[in-house]
Image: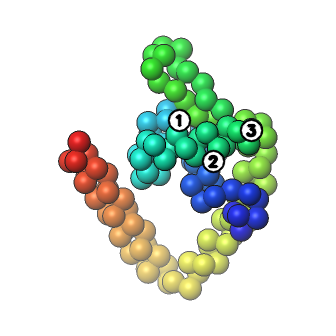
Amino acid sequence: MIRAYGLTTPQFALMEALYHLGSLPLSEIGQKLLVTSGNVTYVMDNLVELGLVSRERCEDDRRVIYALLTPKGEAMIERIFPRHAKEVRELFGVLSPEEQNHLRDLLKKLGRAERIDAEQAV
């Protein structure tokens, strides 16, 4: 479904994060999406080129760069997210509510472990 709109999964994930959380420092995007800073830069470059996101320097700390949706990007995510959410609900609908809760807990645990491993590597 995401490919039908000319987006990759990482591009959609980044746009979805900005849609739900608002503008974010680039450094936080990598942590939230569990990807490297190099991957964030690559995805951002492509989305900027498409006119879907923009970069903005923080006025208080010029070292910090924020990502934000452009009006074009916001319109796109508002159009495609409801369909994506419906597909996800249908996909996970085969699981009982108890199984869905268990899966959510396992995925959270996995996400925390990925961050801990990355922090220990530094």
**Front-lying residue, 97 or 69:** 69
Which residue is nearer to you in this view: 71 or 38?
Answer: 38
Q: Which label number is shown at residue 77?
A: none
Q: Which residue is mark 1?
A: 24
Mark 1, mark 3: which one is toward the viewer? 3
Residue bearing mark 2: 15
Q: Quick one: label 1, few (<14), some, or many (20+) residues within 10 Å? A: some
The residue wearing badge 3 is: 51
Picture residue at 74% right of the left edge, 42% below the top: 50
Point 25% across, 45% down: residue: 119
Query: Which residue is depicted at the point 71% across and 64% down?
Result: 3
**Image position, residue 13 (x, y; %):** 58, 54
- From where the camera sits, is residue 102 visible? yes
Q: Which picture quadrant has residue 5?
A: bottom right
- Relative side of 34 to 40, left or right: left
Image location (x, y in percent) of residue 30: 45, 45
- Against 43, residue 62 (above or below) is above
- Which quadrant would residue 83 be assigned to in this image? bottom right
Element carrying mark 2: helix
Tell me if label 1 and label 3 are in contact, CB under 8 Å: no
Q: How far apart are the alpha carbons under marks 2 and 1? A: 11 Å
Q: Residue furthest top?
A: 60
Q: Amino acid at mark 3?
A: Gly
Neighbor class of circle 3 (other Cα within 10 Å; few <14, some 14-19, many 20+) is some
Percent position (x, y) of residue 105?
37, 68
Q: Residues within 10 Å of mark 2 (few under 14, many from 20)?
A: many
Q: CA distance from mark 1 to mark 3?
A: 17 Å
> Which of the two discs, 3 and 2, sits closer to the camera?
3
The residue type indicated by label 2 comes to: Met
